[in-house]
Amino acid sequence: MTIAHEEAVIDSAAVDAIFAEARTANSFTGEVTEDQARAIYELTKFGPTAFNSQPLRVTYVRSDEARATLVDTLANGNKAKTASAPLVAVLSYDTAWAEQWDNFLPEYNAPKAMYDAAPDLAASTGNNNAHLQAGYFILAVRSLGLAAGPMTGADFGAIDAAFFPAGDQKSFLVVNIGQAGADAWGAVKPKFSYEDVVRTV
């Protein structure tokens, strides 16, 4: 039992499943249903983003053809586990996320002009907040009792060309999803302590 378990408002089993004992899986088994795939997003969407912008876009890769195309873009060490994972998600951000302003923050659209005038700022804001949502996505996977295997070892330019040729989305993460398979975990890696990373000013 840790201080995190003691202070959490969720039970200890949930703390372990989502945080303390959850690890990146490297082999998978079982299946991920359409209801589970939907539930992952339904949890993800509640995490905060700047201006409620929600720029994350999720592409679930299920068909054999799409899976083969995706696997070809991955680093060699990521190919086999992605080919066999029950479900794979490509996470990207909507390059025109600010055009949705009246849908995600209709009562306050004054900041939109700032992004319209600064495309680089719009791109970095979309990218940064989608990365934030990716963290929520991984926690959502874990909260359903599934394992997540997030990967950045990929040619994201090739992924974009194959899956988002219109340029409307920019990918940044591939996530394998399923029940943890045999030998899914490597050795436990050290985590920095509170004293290593936190200061109070």
Image (cartoon, helix red, strand yellow):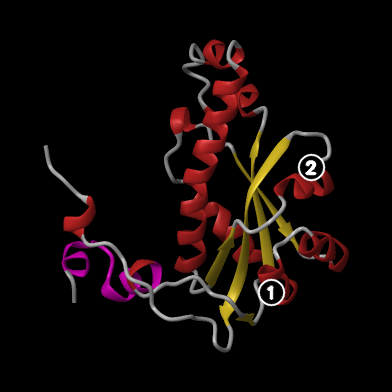
- Say which of marks 2 and 1 sits in front: 2
Q: Do the residues labelled 2 and 1 touch (CB within 8 Å)?
A: no
Is 80 one of the magenta-colored residues? no
Query: How far across and down, in percent of the image, does residue 159 sit?
Result: 76, 50
186 w.r.t. 60: above or below: below
Total numbered labels? 2
Query: How far across and down, in percent of the image, does residue 128 sit?
Result: 50, 37
116 w.r.t. 56: above or below: above
In the foreground, 87 or 109? 87
Q: In this view, does 25 lie to the left or right of 71?
A: left
Majority secondary structure of magenta residues:
helix
Q: Is residue 56 left or right of residue 12?
A: right
The amino acid type found where label 1 is placed reads: Pro
On residue 171, which mark appears? none
Secondary structure under tag 1 reads: loop
Query: How far across and down, in percent of the image, does residue 193 sit?
Result: 22, 62
Residue of label 2:
164
Magenta residues, start to end? 3-18
The amino acid type found where label 2 is placed reads: Phe
Crowd tier of the residue under label 1, counting other residues whose Cα lies within 10 Å: few below 14, some 14–19, many 20 or above: some
Viewport quadrant of the C terminus:
top left
Which residue is at a point 54% across and 82% down the rendered structure image? 184
